[in-house]
Amino acid sequence: MPTAGKLRLGVNIDHVATVRNARGGAYPCPIRAAEMAQAAGADGITAHLREDRRHITDADIDGLMAALKVPLNFEMAATDEMQAIALRHRPHAVCIVPEKREERTTEGGLDVAQDENRLAHFIAPLREAGCRVSIFIAAEPNQIEAAHRIGAQVIELHTGAYCDFHAEGHFDKRDGELQRLTDMAAFAHDLGLEVHAGHGLSYDTVAPIAALPQVIELNIGHFLIGEAIFRGLGPAIAEMRRLMDDARA
């Protein structure tokens, strides 16, 4: 069993851009939000440049690369366009996620097991460019094994079902999903993969995931941006950081 060290918090600033794009113009600025998150204790910033540019834009990526002192995690689909952008900017990390135009958010993990050959060739130049490659997947052994085979250094376990079961009051299903996440975090760690987790996490659901000793980074966005409306971005992040640290301790 690994020793549970400090847990990193990556803050996703996509939905600051969602609010900006609802009216057009430049306000609120996601780069300013990223700088505030950095000052509030975020260990990294995540931004998802989608094919349809529904929130983060190319100019946002340029600005984030210039402004940030903490690492940028560039979420992206496995397309030639996104690969070219990542290779031009060479962010600290890239996280490969599935993407469908009609979805409101990333709704599931990438099916690596069904697309191993293409994904192995897709991530190879990203690794050669010095990017740390993460794959966003469901907590399933075949997906974890496939991510390992294609050469990913990191997996990010999809916590959406666990959070949804909690919100719906299906606590038996929630606990079953938590056990699956627990088992698969240990399985991935034993394979030598770095383990991250994210999607849908809130103050109510973060502690059991933060307590998993194999998980070394949580990526949280929508909840923190929503909570910032009520308490401010810095205090919202500080409270998440406190809950994470308490659970880890």
Image: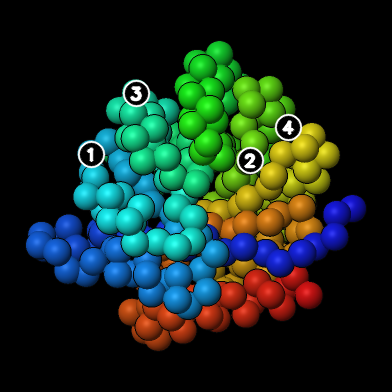
The amino acid marked with disc number 2 is Val
Residue identified by numbered label 3: 80
User: What is the C-alpha distance between the residues marked 3 and 4?
Assistant: 28 Å
Which residue, given by chain and number where applicable, does mark 2 sit on?
A: 154
x then y, percent, for residue 195: 68, 47
Q: Closer to the camera: disc 1 or disc 3?
A: 3
Give the answer, above or below, for where 101 lies relative to 213. above
Q: Is residue 200 visible?
A: no
Please tell me the numbered disc located at residue 141. 4
Query: In terms of sequence position, does the residue under pointer 2 or pointer 3 come before the other?
Result: 3
122 relative position to 140: left or right: left
User: Percent position (x, y) of residue 92?
Assistant: 50, 46
**Quick check: can you spot residue 85?**
yes
Q: Crowdedness of circle 2 by 10 Å Cα count: few (<14), some, many (20+)?
A: many
- Whichever of callouts 2 and 1 sits on the residue coming sooner in the sequence is 1
Q: Quadrant location of residue 89?
A: top left
User: How far apart in space, not on screen, are marks 2 and 4 (Cα)?
Assistant: 14 Å
Numbered badge on residue 52:
1
Q: Nearer the viewer, residue 68 or 247?
A: 68
Residue depth check, mark 2 versus mark 1: number of the one nearer the observer: 2
Identify the mark nearer the N-term, 2 or 4: 4
The amino acid beneath tag 1 is Asp
Q: Which mark is residue 247?
A: none
Considering only order in the chain, which callout, 4 or 3, is on the residue closer to the N terminus?
3
Mark with earlier residue (1, 3): 1
Mark 3 or mark 4, whichever is nearer to me = 3
Disc 3 residue type (three-letter):
Asp
Q: Which x, y percent locates residue 75?
A: 43, 44
For the residues bearing labels 2 and 1, Cβ distance under 8 angstroms: no
> Which quadrant is the C terminus positioned in?
bottom right
